[in-house]
């Protein structure tokens, strides 16, 4: 009975955050655009080491599916998770926390950009979002520094959850050059982002 109740709760959560394909759900005020991904590419060393510790999280394989249309309630969940994690976690470098670079871990009270991403991804999965639609993404900031954000795949476009920004934005409305992200079909693989530079040029010109 307890197991059945748990399944029912998951079904209700899924229905609340996702709409059927034919449902008319208003998207955020932005053009629906998605990243164009390419070939398999190198996995960040921090993610590789994270996968050695959390193997189950990096062995999830999914069939290629169309990104889901998120409901108004689903958007509110996404925004709440982004804001809550940004407020709860104090930004701190891996060197300050662990005495070395590139440690990807779930943060307790402090962490760097990858840690923010991992926690947001975990919380959204707990809310019913699929791991194939919550993709860790590596970008380059305008100053040339590397950075990590969480991409949420939706029928309305690819949206970014960022520890440097409390608003959830369409990826083309961010100042970043997008380099690579987790593959939607395999949480342990990474793919290139083919149109990241083109979008950056377009956004700078606007």
Image (spheres, grey):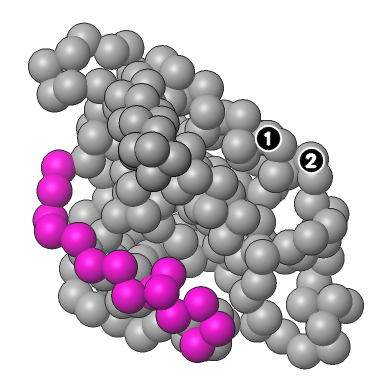
* Membership of 163 in magenta stretch: no
- In this rendering, would 60 be left or right of 160? left
Alpha-carbon span between mark 1 and mark 2: 6 Å
Q: Secondary structure at mark 2?
A: helix
Instruction: Decide which of 131, 36 is in the foreground and name it.
Output: 131
Q: Are marks 1 and 2 in contact (CB under 8 Å)?
A: yes
| Residue positioned 68% across, 35% down in the render | 83
Give residue 200's position: percent from left, percent from top: 41, 50
In the image, is 78 to the left or to the right of 135? right
Image quarter in which the C terminus is found: top left
Q: Can you say whether 97 is above or below 42 in the image?
A: above
Quarter where residue 177 is shown: bottom left
Relative vertical location of residue 75 with respect to residue 161 in this rendering, above or below:
above
Q: In the rendering, which numbered label is found on residue 42?
A: none
Q: Residue at x 56, y 46 (%)?
A: 123
Instruction: Tell me the tag on residue 83.
Output: 1
Left-right relation of 63 to 117: left
Q: Position of residue 87 (x, y in %)?
A: 79, 40
For this orientation, the residue located farthest to the front is 1
Horizontal and vertical percent for residue 97?
85, 76
Q: Which residues are magenta?
A: 52-66
Neighbor class of circle 2 (other Cα within 10 Å; few <14, some 14-19, many 20+) is few
Residue 199 in view, yes or no:
no
Task: Indicate the secondary structure of the residue bearing disc 1.
Answer: helix
Q: Which residue is mark 2?
A: 87
Looking at the picture, tell me which residue is in the foreground, 53 or 25.
53
Q: How many numbered marks have been drawn onto this rendered protein structure? A: 2
The magenta stretch spans residue 55: yes
**Up/down of 166 relative to 112, above or below:** above
The residue at the point 41 percent across, 74 percent down is: 56
* Residue drawn at (84%, 88%) of the image: 99
Q: Position of residue 33 (x, y in %)?
A: 27, 37
């Amino acid at each position: 009975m307890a197991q059945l109740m748990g399944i029912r709760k998951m079904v209700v959560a899924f229905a609340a955050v996702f709409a059927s394909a034919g449902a008319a759900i208003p998207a955020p005020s932005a053009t629906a655009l998605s990243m164009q991904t390419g070939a398999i590419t190198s996995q960040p060393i921090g993610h590789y080491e994270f996968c050695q510790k959390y193997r189950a999280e990096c062995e999830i394989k999914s069939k290629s599916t169309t990104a889901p249309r998120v409901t108004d309630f689903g958007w509110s969940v996404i925004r709440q998770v982004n804001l809550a994690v940004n407020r709860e976690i104090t930004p701190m470098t891996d060197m300050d926390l662990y005495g070395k670079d590139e440690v990807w871990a779930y943060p307790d009270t402090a962490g760097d950009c990858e840690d923010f991403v991992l926690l947001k991804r975990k919380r959204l999965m707990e809310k019913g979002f699929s791991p194939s639609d919550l993709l860790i993404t590596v970008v380059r900031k305008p100053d040339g520094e590397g950075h990590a954000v969480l991409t949420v795949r939706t029928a309305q476009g690819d949206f970014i959850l960022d520890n440097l920004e409390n608003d959830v934005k369409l990826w083309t409305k961010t100042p970043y050059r997008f380099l690579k992200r987790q593959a939607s079909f395999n949480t342990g693989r990474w793919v290139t982002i083919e149109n990241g530079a083109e979008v950056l040029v377009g956004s700078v010109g606007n």
